[in-house]
Each structure stands twice: as structure tokens, then as C-alpha cells.
Amino acid sequence: MKNYGIDTVDAVKALPDELTKYGTEVVDQFLKGGDPQGKHWSHIESQANNPGRASDPINAIWEDGSTNMSRGSRDMTLQERVGASFDNHMDAFLTTVRTQEFWQRTLGNAFEASVYAAAITAIDMLLIHRDELLNATTERKKEIVVDILKQSGLMAAGALPVSVFLAVALLLIPGLSVVMAPLGVVGSVGLSVRLITSLVKNPSQQEKDLLTAVQGRLRGLMYDIQKSSNGSVTITVQALKGA
């Protein structure tokens, strides 16, 4: 904010909205995590190409520092903006899911603090084994998941905490769906979908601007996009002249 002369409110608007509900400490963890260089305030039109927009908050998003630095003085492409938005939501989810507050909100207050601690431990163990879970055989994936549930102590907490953990695991490692049926928790797939829906329903202000810009480019060309009050999207395809 000091470097570019932007207001605090604009920096906060650029964060994934679900993140801001958890307070300053979690936001700080998000900004310092996800990348060795943390999150950078990354310009869409670079300072080299358009120095006059360096302090324009609409011209920047939060992005992994390594990605920002590797781009150099080049302007950000549309694909890079979309990729950064997805990455920010996943990093925000990874940050919040490792907090006691996430588990309290998800499970309610009916569980003791030890259950929330066990859930966070299980998530940490899941991330440690993530590469192996992405590439292992189905049987080995099942062994790892069961071992995580037992070693973390979450297995003893009951069906609901275990199901939420497995839903989170599915969100982070989609290939784990093959082990859900043998574990008898197919319902976690639906919960995982609802968690994903929660993510995409909380865009940052920059993401809203991006979607508006994309919609504006498409409207009047080949497509028209309408969003109804219930959240469903209709795309009307218009015939090209001379087609």
C-alpha cells in the first residue's frame, strides 16, 4: 500500500472474499504463504508499459510472488489473471482449512477443541503426503488416507468430522474419489462439491471486474450471458452474419 499509494480498502477488496471473514491473522498467513515469495501486488498492465496506472487498484491483483517476478515487464494475459484467481482461492482455502475457526464453523460447537486440533493435524498430514496421493495406486491411496485418519486421531471423532475431512481431501486431490466407495463415504463427494461452490461464490472485486470485462467482450459478438436470481447461467448463441 505504501509502495503504490493504494487504500487499505482496495487491497482488502482484492482478496478472496471468503478469506476476509477469518480476520487479520489468517489474511497475513495467506499473504505470506502459497509461494516462497508470498503474495505480490501484481500489476495487470506493467509499470514499465503503463506507469500512470501503477497506483490504480483496478490494475492489480494478488498473485504468487515467483510468478509475478518471472513475468518481468510484460503485461498480464487473461489466462494468467484467471490462473492467479484460481490459485488465490485455493491458497485461501488451504489457509482457512488449517484454522480452528473453519472447523468450528463447519462442524458447529458440538465438538471439543481436541476434534478441531485432530482435523487440522489430518490436513497437515494430507498435504505432506499430497504428491504420493496424486500418483499412488488406488490401494496405496486408501492405506495413506486410513493411516492419516488414525494417526491424527480424527477417526475417533466420528462420521461427521471424517466426512468433512474427506471432502476437503477430494477438493485438494480429486483422484481420491476412487477410494471413497471402499471407505464407505461416497457422500463426501457431494460435500466437496459444495465446498467448491462456496469458493466460487466469493470472488474478489478484481475477479468481478474481470468477469464483467469478459462478458462485455463476448456480448454482441457470438454469445450473450445472462445470470438469473437463482445463480444459473444462460448462454445465448447468436448466428454469425453470412453463416
Image: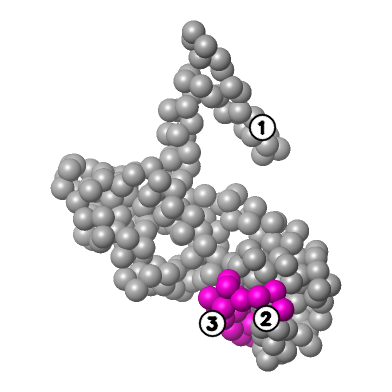
Q: Amino acid at mark 3?
A: Ile
- Magenta segment: 115-139
Under circle 1, the secondary element is loop
Sequence-first disc among 3 and 1? 3
From the image, give the main secondary structure of the stretch colored magenta: helix
Q: Amino acid at mark 2?
A: Arg
Is label 3 in contact with label 1 (beta carbons under 8 Å)? no
The numbered dot on residue 140 is 2
Pick the residue in front: 54 or 139: 139
Residue in the picture at 58% in, 73% down = 135
The numbered dot on residue 198 is none
- In this rendering, the answer to whether 76 lies above or below 172 is above
Determine which residue is flagged by label 1: 228
Neighbourhood count class around disc 2 (C-alpha, 10 Å): few under 14, some 14–19, many 20 upward: some
Residue 161: x %, y % from top left: 75, 76
Which picture quadrant has residue 1?
bottom left
Pick the residue in front: 57 or 185: 185
Under circle 3, the secondary element is helix
- In the image, 241: left or right of 170? left
Q: Nearer the viewer, mark 2 or mark 1?
A: 2
- In this rendering, the answer to whether 152 lies above or below 28 is below
Neighbourhood count class around disc 3 (C-alpha, 10 Å): few under 14, some 14–19, many 20 upward: few
Residue 234: x %, y % from top left: 64, 30
Which residue sits furthest top?
242
Residue in the picture at 48% in, 71% down = 26
Q: Is 116 part of what is drawn in magenta?
A: yes
Sequence-first disc among 2 and 3? 3
Q: Amino acid at mark 1?
A: Ser
Q: Is 229 part of what is drawn in magenta?
A: no
Is label 2 in contact with label 3 (beta carbons under 8 Å)? no
Determine which residue is flagged by label 3: 128
Residue 24: x %, y % from top left: 45, 69
